[in-house]
Amino acid sequence: MEAFLNTLSNIFGAFGSGIIIPIILFVLSKAMGVETKKAFNSALLCGVGLTGFNLVINSYSGVIAPIVQSMVDNTGVQLSTLDTGWQSTSIIAYSTTVGVLFIGVAIALQLVLFFVGYTDVFMASDLWNNYSFMVWGSMLYALTKNMLLAMALMVVQLFYILLFSEMCAVRWGTYYEYDGCCMTAPHHLEAFPFAVCMDWILTKIGFNKIKINAASLQKKLGLLGEPMMIGLFVGLLIGLIGEAPFLFGENALNAWGTALGAAINTAAIMAVFPKVAAIFASAFTSMSDAYKSKAAASAKNRRWFLSVNDACGYGETNTLVTGVLLIPIMLVLSFILPGNTVLPMADLCALPYMVEVFVCISNGNIAKSMVMGALWFSLGMIMFSQLSPTFTEVAIGAGFQLPQAGVYICSFGIVCHPLICGLFYIFYSQNIILILIAIAVYVVAYLWFRKNKQKVYDYLENNAAAYQA
C-alpha cells in the first residue's frame, strides 16, 4: 500500500496538473458517452489552457516579484516570513509522508461520497488541489507526531470544503459561465461563509450603490476604464513605487524601464489571460452537453457539479481587476498589521485566484470584493504568522532549501486563510470538546443545507441580481 501511495505521489509530482487533469477529463468524458475524438480534443484544450495559465502567470511573476522585493527594500520593513509561492508549497505537500498517505484517502473519499449521493460535487476531477489539505496535515504531524490526528484534520477540512463548494456551485458556475461546474480549491472555498455574511453587511451599508466593476468603469471612463488600461496604470504605480529611489539618479534610465515594463506586463496579463481562459473553458463544452442530455433522459435527474481548476475564474475581468488592485493594498497592510510576520511576494500575482468567491458572491462588485479580500487575507496573515516556523520545518524535511538563514517561508495564497487555519488550531489543541464542536457545526450545516438546498441557491442568485452595474 505504501509503495502504491509513493508511486501516486511521484506521478503527481512528475506530471503536474497540466497533464493529470486532462487525463481525468478524458476519462470522465468517455464515461459520459462523449465520442473519442471530442473527448481527446477536450482534454487537449484543457492541457493547453492550464499550460497557458502557468506560462502567463510565471512570466508575470518574473517581472513583478523583483519590483515587489524592491518596494520592501525601499521601505526598510523587516518581516521574517517570506512568501515563496503556491508552486513550491504544492511540491512540499506532495513530498511529505502525510501528504502521500492522504492523497489515497482523498481519492477514495471523494469518489465514494459522490457516488453514494452524499455530495453532488465530483471533486475527484481536481485532485491536484488536495495539496492544500496535505500542507495542514503535515504541519500538525510535525507538531504532534500524531498521524491519526493529522488525518482526521484533513478529512474534516475536506468535508467542510465539499459542503462550501456545493453551496457556492450554482453561483460560481453562473457568474463564471461554466454550466454544471464548480470550484473546489480549499484555499479559496474556505472563505465562502465569510463572503456571504460580509456581502449582506456591505449591502446593508450601501455598497451596492457603489457601481465599481469592469463594465461600469469602462462605461464611465471609456478607454481608461478598460481592464487593459487599468492594468497599465496599476502596474505603472507598482513599478514607480518599487523604483522610486532610482527614478532621478544615475540609474534613472533602467529604473524607468523597469517601471514601464511593470506597466505593460500588467496590461498584458489583463488582456491575454481572458483569452487563455476561453480556451480552457471550451474544454468542458462536450462534457457539459453530454451531461445535459443524460440529465434530461434520467428519471432521477440528479444535478451534479464537475470540479474544475480555480484557474477558470482568473481571467474574468472583475476578478482580474480586483486581484490586481489588491496587490499594493495587501503589501501595505502586511507592513502595518500588528502581529504579522508574513511578507506576501510570490503569491501576490495569485490574488485573482484568491478573490473568486468574493467576486462571484458580490456579482462582480469590485468595491465589495476588495473590502472582503483585504479583511480576510489580513486576518489570515495574522493567524498564520505563529505557524511559519512549523511550515518551514516541514519544507526543510521535504528537501526545500531556505533562501537565507534566519527567515521562514510560507505561501500567502495557500495558508493565510482564517477558517481552514482555525480548524488546524482546533485540532492542534487536541481538546476533544473543541474538535467535537467543529465536527458538530459541520454536521448541522450539512443537514440544514440538504433540507434547504434550493433556498440557498435562490438566495445567492437573488442577492447577486440585486447588484447591477
Image (tube, rainbow, N blue to C red):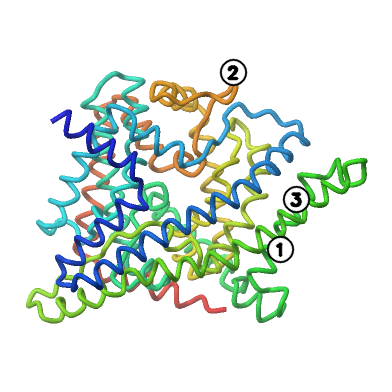
Q: Mark 3 or mark 2: name the one nearer the start of the chain.
A: 3
Q: Secondary structure at mark 2?
A: loop
- Residue at (60%, 52%) from the top-left corner? 60
- Find residue 326 and report its horizontal and vertical position in percent: 62, 53
- Find residue 295 and report its horizontal and vertical position in percent: 16, 76
Q: Amino acid at mark 3?
A: Gly
Q: Residues within 10 Å of mark 2 (few under 14, many from 20)?
A: few
The quarter of the displayed image where residue 334 is located: top right
Q: Secondary structure at mark 3?
A: helix
- How far is mark 3 from mark 2, CA to CA? 29 Å
- Kindly identify which numbered label has been placed on residue 439: none
- Residue at (58%, 65%) from the top-left corner? 366
Instruction: Please indicate whether residue 306 sits to the left or right of residue 267 in the image.
Output: left
- How far is mark 3 from mark 1, CA to CA? 10 Å
Residue placed most toward the observer, 103 or 366: 103
The quarter of the displayed image where residue 397 is located: top left
Location of mark 3 (residue): 239
Location of mark 1 (residue): 232
Q: Secondary structure at mark 1?
A: helix
Q: Amino acid at mark 1?
A: Leu
Q: Are marks 3 and 1 in contact (CB under 8 Å)?
A: no
Q: Amino acid at mark 2?
A: Ala
- Residue at (51%, 65%) from the top-left corner? 315
